Image (tube, rainbow, N blue to C red):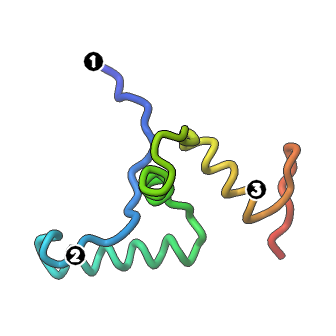
Amino acid sequence: MNPAPATAPATVAEPAPASASGSPLREAGRYIAQSFRLMVGQPSYDTYVAHRQRTHPGEPLMSYEAFFRERQEARYGGGKGRMGRCC
């Protein structure tokens, strides 16, 4: 039994255009998922990677773990191993 490779979880960065998605129901699901992620503030690593490749080609990318940690610290503050408060 081969273990699965360690990769970043898949996220939907942007909904696909209707012509590429295959069905209106699938497109609606993608929009709902994207809206939910934006409401709860879940960062999108795929969007980050696409942006970096488009605007800063050849520069190193953060790992998924480093990206998530940086976004959490930016959102909640803290740093140095302690979480700040959001409220």
**Gap between marks 1 and 2 measured at Cα:** 38 Å
Q: Secondary structure at mark 3?
A: helix
The mark lying in front, picked from 3 and 2, is 2
Amino acid type for the residue under numbered disc 2? Pro
Marks 1, 3: nearer the viewer: 3
Tell me the quarter of the image containing the N terminus. top left
Q: Residue 54 in the image: state x and y as whole percent.
A: 42, 56
Q: Residue at x 85, y 67 (%)?
A: 85
Task: Judge left or right: residue 19 versus residue 61.
Answer: left
Q: Which residue is mark 2?
A: 17
Q: CA distance from mark 1 to mark 3?
A: 38 Å
Q: Tell which circle, 1 or 3, labels the residue nearer the N-terminal end.
A: 1
Q: What residue is drawn where x is 40% and y is 64%?
A: 13
Res. 73 mark: 3
Label 2 Cα crowd, 10 Å radius (few <14 / some 14-19 / many 20+): few
In the picture, the quarter occupied by the C terminus is bottom right
Label 1 or label 2, whichever lies nearer to me, is 2
Write down the residue under mark 1: 1
Q: Is residue 69 found left or right of 11 in the rendered image?
A: right
